[in-house]
Amino acid sequence: MRLFIDSANLEEIRKAAEFKIIDGVTTNPSLIAREGHDHHDQIRAICGILDGDISAEVVATDMEGMIREGRALAKIHDSVVVKIPLIRDGIKAVATLSSEGIRTNVTLCFSPLQALLAAKAGAYLISPFIGRLDDISHDGSELIREIVAIYDNYGYPTEVLAASARGPLHVKEAALAGAHVCTLPFKVFDQLFNHPLTDIGLEKFLADYRKTLVVQA
Ligand code: G3P
């Protein structure tokens, strides 16, 4: 499973890139706004930090505007994947952009039938928001399983990117459900390393080893 960092913060992305196991970055208008810099400049800076797919989202909601913005975002860097919301004009824009060879990430997906439409339009990635479904007591991981099953049934090449991960359990559920990618906040990525028995076991190994040094001395 590929892991992306869901952030527009350059310091977080630099820290994540140091592990050499992060395969990309997803941003959205809220994450970009939080950084307070020009959208294209921020995306260009991210592309300079990490090799991998960098999702940059349009803010237009009409087909012509999304196509125009998508073409401009794609020109920033070869790593850019254009994020398009799953609305009627968005699907029309995806069909045009994908026919021009521009990779798209269709976002704000909350149903398997929405995901079917995105695949038919030629989306490169589909982003079901599992955390926001769980937030309203729906089963986000079930959505991942349904999309993976539908895509497998018909051989759609669109890859499933589990988004809106709220914690390590979402990452596990996405992996078990067969998502191709999971995007996660840096805080959640950092939590993946943690287990108390690892810490206890390492401390015991080192304590036992230190005893032998005392004996040898
Ligand atoms: O960036 C897309 C998605 O990961 C947003 O997650 O936490 O705002 O639901 P969240």
Image (spheres, grey):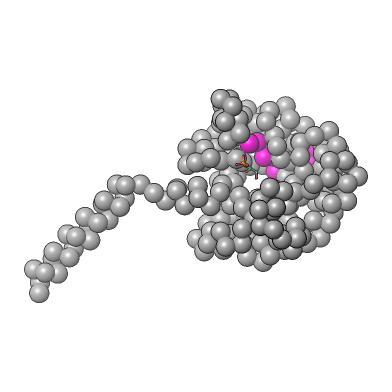
Q: Residue furthest right?
A: 64
Whether residue 6 appears in magenta in the rendering, the answer is no
Membership of 122 in magenta stretch: yes
- Say above or below: 170 vs 142: below
Residue drawn at 68 percent across, 65 percent down: 45
- In the rendering, at what x and y percent does residue 55 appear? 70, 51
Instruction: Please tell me in which quarter of the rendered image ligand 1 is found.
Output: top right
**145 lies left or right of 167:** right
Q: Residue at x 50, y 50 (%)?
A: 187
Residue 153: tell me if it is visible.
Answer: no
Residue 102 x/y as whole percent: 80, 51
194 and 32: which is toward the camera: 32
Residue sitting at the far top: 137
Q: Residue at x 27, y 56 (%)?
A: 202
Give the x, y percent position of residue 209: 18, 63
The outermost residue toward the bottom is 217
Q: Is residue 207 above or below residue 158?
A: below
Question: In the rendered picture of this protein, how many numbered marks are placed on residues?
Answer: 0
47 shown above or below 195: below
Who's the residue at 88% across and 40% down the image?
62
Dividing the picture into quadrants, the one containing residue 87 is: top right
Residue 169 left/right relative to 54: left
Residue 121 position in % (x across, y down): 81, 37
Please say whether residue 40 is visible from this viewpoint. Answer: yes
Give the quarter of the figure containing the C terminus: bottom left
Q: Quadrant of residue 148?
A: top right
44 and 21: which one is in front?
Answer: 44
User: Left or right: 202 with respect to 61?
Assistant: left
Q: Which residues are magenta?
A: 120-129
